[in-house]
Image: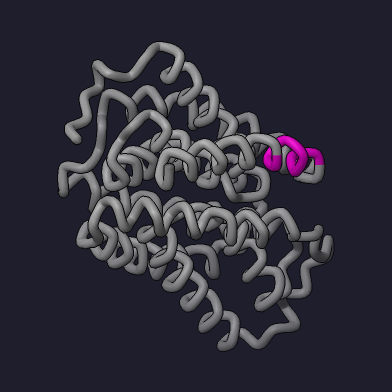
Amino acid sequence: MEFSYETITSGSLVLLFGLLFLSSFIDAIAGGGGLISLPAYLLTGLPAHYALGSNKLSASCGTLMATINYMKNGVLDWRMAVISAAFSFIGAACGSTAALHIDDAVLKKVIVFVLPVAAVIILSKRNLSDENFAADVPRNKRLIFAACIGLFIGFYDGMIGPGTGTFAIIAYCLLMKYDLRTASGNAKMLNLASNVASAITFALAGTVMWKLAVPGAAFCILGGQVGSRLAIARGAKFIRPMLIVVLVMILVKLATDVFF
């Protein structure tokens, strides 16, 4: 079926941009924004490859704003974050390239099955340590962990995407013993690199719906700005109930569209 921008109703656009703001807001605090933004693009009727490409472009802008705020407040480990970001860029480029070679219908079904799994992991996540014990991990081991986290999570982000930021936060906390705020800052830089690599890959392949992605980017920037400031000041506990409600509604609608 051919997709046309003109077939999208004004109500669908309002819903899309509202969900993009919400996704970027949530992502800046605890990751997982792709659980909302990717299905939101799919709900407009976009083919899966275009939804992935458009989502990566707009998400990159929101992640950039959040990353800048974390940088300004010194809430990240620069050396490890840069290493992870470099490997994340490589991994995401490979993942995005792989996604382009998967049939659209198959990719959409993969997304539907991956989203609930990512959601369970994200929603079961508890607040991890508030203290930074990264110095207890040998430097060489930290370097290896930073590279591996970037490469593998970057590949996942390029291929599918939702939950990337939260998976990275968990990995930084469990493997490298960072406190939650520093892990969140590192995750934002990693996620920024993977989003940019994926966005470039999809744009070069011509699978970005610019009429949706560009205004969507503005809402993601606003959400990233508000969310990251709130994260640095207060944390993410109050976000979970809102994420559950929106996530359940989107997954039910998307699964219905795909399978029925």
Residue sitting at x 63%, y 70%: 171
Figure quadrant of the N terminus: top left
Residue sitting at x 37%, y 14%: 9
Figure quadrant of the C terminus: top left
- Is 163 inside the magenta-drawn segment? no
Please identify the quarter of the rendering in which residue 100 is found. bottom left
Indicate the position of residue 104 as horizontal and vertical percent values. Answer: 26, 51
- Is 243 inside the magenta-drawn segment? yes
Residue sitting at x 75%, y 82%: 136
Indicate the position of residue 233 as horizontal and vertical percent values. Answer: 78, 39
**First to last magenta residue range:** 238-244
Vertical comparison of 30 with 186: above or below: above
Name the residue furthest front. Answer: 260
> What's the coloring here?
one colour
Vertical comparison of 106 with 208: above or below: below
**234 left or right, relative to 149:** right
Name the residue furthest top. Answer: 10
Q: Answer yes or no: is residue 66 visible.
A: no
